[in-house]
Amino acid sequence: MSLYFSEDELKYKIADIIVEYTAKYEELKRLSEPFGYNGAKPAQLFLSVKDEYLNSLLSRAVEGTTIGEIEDYAIATQFNRAAINYGTMLVHSSALICDGGAYLFSADSGVGKSTHTKLWLKAFGDKVHIMNDDKPVVKLYDDRAVAFGTPFDGGSGIALNESYPLRAIIFVERGEQNSVRIPDSREIIQKLYFQTARMVDRETAEKMLVNMEKLISLTRFYVLTCNMDISAAYAAYNSIIEKSEA
């Protein structure tokens, strides 16, 4: 059953932000439905994309990309840029949930962040699950950071309407040996910049930097160098999860 009332009231609650948009294609409709909102609060964000823009993006996409995937990407991009002004930021990552906390494994496309988190599923079974495999967001409150799932899945199909306290953000790098280190603030900002919403106006960019500085003060950051063997999941757990829960 749909959580909203009619085709005229397409409101969603994403990261505690009331958002209004009308999905044109089945993929985004399906992913959005768990986020449906039928409360009395007015929409804070209004998102829309024109068919011409979607077709333009599709013409430049890799072969096999569907128009539904393009719509998901386009609406996600609008949301992630606008959400910056609500103390919320995209972290391009695979959001792993373990012991009631969120651990965001972030990396450039192709490095293997999703492959790594799937090793955790194999290693730890029901102890862990993936909330969103590509575009979770982090909302910054006065004294805490919370990771939220979004309807935007990057093609993985994993887009749960959940939220958990953010325990750590882990930047993943490929290597033959598994190791974990703590980056300094300069490296964190540099890496975060490439894994969040960009191409924003000056005012929004300034707010984004404020969000980054606050995020750094509220959570832990690690750089994980790892191979694609299941031992990488155990090594990360021992060095990151146990320390974060200490």
Image (tube, rainbow, N blue to C red):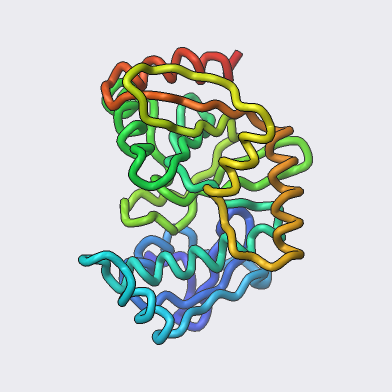
Horizontal and vertical percent for residue 48?
51, 78
Q: At 72% from the left edge and 50% from the top edge, which residue is drawn? A: 209
Q: Residue furthest left?
A: 64
Residue 182: x percent and y percent?
59, 22
Residue at horizontal 60 percent and vertical 26 percent from the top? 183
Q: Out of 151 and 57, give the one closest to the viewer.
A: 57
Q: Residue at x 51, y 27 (%)?
A: 223
Q: Is residue 63 left or right of residue 73?
A: left
- Image quarter where the C terminus lies is top right
Q: Residue 192 occupies which quadrant of the picture?
A: top right
Left or right: residue 221 compared with residue 61: right
The x, y position of residue 27, in whole percent, is 32, 66
Left or right side of 217 for 151: left
Q: Position of residue 64 (x, y in %)?
A: 21, 66
Q: Does 167 sit above or below residue 18?
A: above
Q: Quadrant of residue 17?
A: bottom right
* Vertical relation: 157 (above or below) 61: above
Image quarter where the N terminus lies is bottom left
Q: In this view, does 188 lie to the left or right of 69?
A: right
Q: Work out whether residue 119 or residue 11 is closer to the camera in this orientation and state it.
A: 119
- Which residue shows up at 37% across the image and 30% down it? 174
